[in-house]
Amino acid sequence: MLVVSRKPGERLLIGESVEIVVLAVRRDQVSLGISAPRAVPVHRQELLERIRRENQRAAALGADQLQHMGACLRSRLASQGTAAAAPLTAANPAPDDSPAITGAA
Amino acid sequence: MSRRVVRSCAPPPSAKTGRRTHGASATRRILESRRFGSLDVSPETVIRCPSGLLGFEEFQEYILVQPEGLEPLSFLVACENPDVAFPVLAGGLCQPGYAPAIPTHVLESLGAATRQEVEVLAICTMAPDTGTLHANLRGPVVLNPASRLACQVALDDGTYSLRHLLGAG
């Protein structure tokens, strides 16, 4: 692993299109500014790890648990007056011009 | 649990190995799933997920099935290993008004021009200890039904919960 010491205001360039600037250092926390093309996803590592764990939990569910989930959801939807077999195409409207959330500014 | 049909088609092609294929396999095939029985897969129903799902990057082709008795859940079943399946719900069923911002480059990678062209699915889980049901609204699966391309998106902004409570067991 490349180890680089930087001071606030100093920058790192990764390839031709990714730039990282140290904005501030306070106690045990570093603020970084990251410029990258939108197609380059930038994530906090722990978020990806948490999603990975949720995926693994979901894939590990047993038949009994899935039956239970289905029954719970049916009764919940029925109590809300929603069709139990609502199609997956249930609308998820959102504005077209939603701002990007992955990829750095 | 009911079987999802049909043994009368051609046998599945020989096992595919690892890396992504460009496009779904060209013939119908039968997937044998311990959980769902025989699943009849025609090429046009295969959903390609080139990046895979987090933790399951080795699987890049899925089908979406809705087994009887488990409604309203649907399942993303990995074609490369049909014993791997993720229960999903439409995001809007999990939380009314659920409308995560999908990055433009994600839409483009799925062949969608606008947000309205894609469906957003939440993977559901159940806490084994408490029996409470959750939906992952922070890492939804975004699917373009037209191109049958999908990907899992990590939402960094924290608006939506990784374990949105669906109900107590």
Image (tube, coloured by chain):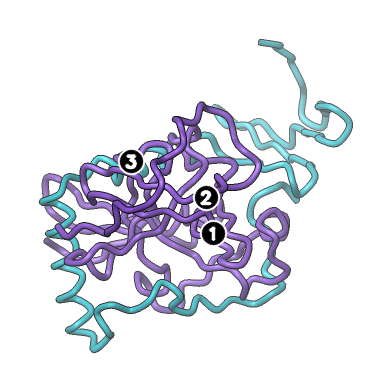
Question: What number is the disc on residue A22?
Answer: none
Residue behind mark 1: B44
Residue A87 placement, left or right of A77: right
Q: How far apart are marks 1 and 2 (CA)?
A: 21 Å
Q: Which residue is drawn at 45% across and 78% down?
A: B97
Question: What number is the disc on residue B84?
Answer: 3
Chain drawn cyan in the picture: A
How many residues crowd mark 3 within 10 Å: few (<14), some (14–19), many (20+)? many
Q: Where in the figure is residue B46, as x and y percent of width and height?
A: 50, 54
Chain designation of label 3:
B
Q: Work out which quarter of the rendered image holds the C terminus of chain B and state it.
A: bottom left
Residue B150 placement, left or right of A52: right
Q: Nearer the viewer, mark 2 or mark 3?
A: 3
**Disc 2 residue type (three-letter):** Gln
Marked residue nearer the N-terminal end (2 or 3): 3
Question: What number is the disc on residue B152?
Answer: 2
Q: Where in the figure is residue A27, as x and y percent of width and height?
A: 57, 28
How many residues crowd mark 2 within 10 Å: few (<14), some (14–19), many (20+)? many
Do the dots labelled 1 and 3 sit on one chain? yes
Q: In this view, does B77 lie above or below A89?
A: above
Most foreground residue, A67 or A52: A67
